[in-house]
Image: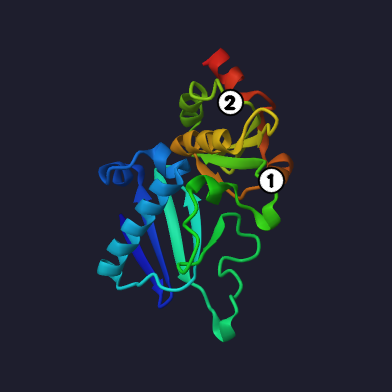
Amino acid sequence: MEIERINENTVKFFLSYMDIEERGFTREEVWYNREKSEELFWDMMDEINDEAEFEAEGPLWIQVHAKKNGIEVTVTRANTADGQLGESPFGSDAEHDVFHDIGGGSFQSMEDILSATENNVEWMENTFEFNEFENVIQLASRMRHYEAKTSLYSYNNKYYLHVVFDSEQMDDKEKTNMFSVLSEFGVPTKTTIHLLEEYGHIIVESDVFTQITKYF
């Protein structure tokens, strides 16, 4: 595990999937088992307290980003001046903010975190970045059973897969599972479909994985 102390109230750590497994957890448990994700989180906070002298006390803002080889978590002690909770330190457009009050409630599972958006807007789409086309080819064989609309672009010497989830065919657990597999091969990015359509080059317009498995 990599730990970075940002400032007095913020710490960031990166936990690879290998780290997670070495600690006795499976990737599936961390993604959508609330009790297991909470157990792992507090184990990490205890370790961070020992190494970086960062105590998880009072309300916390937690931001989680799925990376290609693991998860990156930023934890900030909330500003509670005058008894009021301050604004999120991650900005109003942060997609994966989770507030956790140590005094009550429980840490949310990765499924809850990844599906959380501003004003509880339904989690509908993601864009993933790939350094090599070979990574997309390897991913295609793992995507046969997921119902989602896909398109593939090249932009600035990288490849971008845009995914629109079919909410009628997929529940949040299935979306999270698909997100987890996608994150094994690519990196979630905030690059928008609008930018890709305007400045990128379309490689596969639709049904990306079927087309790739057909020709590769």
Q: Is residue 8 left or right of residue 190?
A: left
Under mark 2, the amino acid is Tyr
Give the mark, 1 or 2, whose residue is nearer the N terminus: 1
Res 176 quadrant in image: top right
Q: Name the residue under label 2.
A: 146
Residue most extreme to the bottom: 82
Which structural element holds mark 2? loop
Q: In this view, does 7 lie above or below 72?
A: below
Circles 1 and 2, Cβ within 8 Å, touching? The answer is no
- Assess disc 1: are there few (<14), some (14-19) or many (≥20) residues with their C-alpha within 10 Å of its C-alpha: few
At 65% from the left edge and 44% from the top edge, which residue is drawn?
123
**Residue depth check, mark 1 versus mark 2: number of the one nearer the observer:** 1
Query: Which quarter of the picture shows residue 162?
Result: top right
Task: State the quadrant of the N terminus.
Answer: bottom left
Amino acid type shown at disc 1: Glu
Q: Is residue 209 above or below residue 214?
A: below
Label at residue 43:
none
- The answer to whether 38 appears left or right of 84 in the picture is left
Residue 77 is left or right of residue 117, and the answer is left
Task: Determine whether the residue tagged by mark 1 lies in a helix, strand or loop.
Answer: loop
Q: How crowded is mark 2: few (under 14 residues within 10 Å), some or many (20 or more)?
A: some
Which residue is tagged 1?
122
Foreground residue, 178 or 153? 178
Q: x, y percentage for residue 37? A: 41, 49
Front one among 214 and 93: 93
Alpha carbon of mark 1 to alpha carbon of mark 2: how far?
18 Å
> Residue 115 appears at what percent x and percent y?
59, 47
What residue lies at 53% left-to-right and 25% top-to-bottom?
143
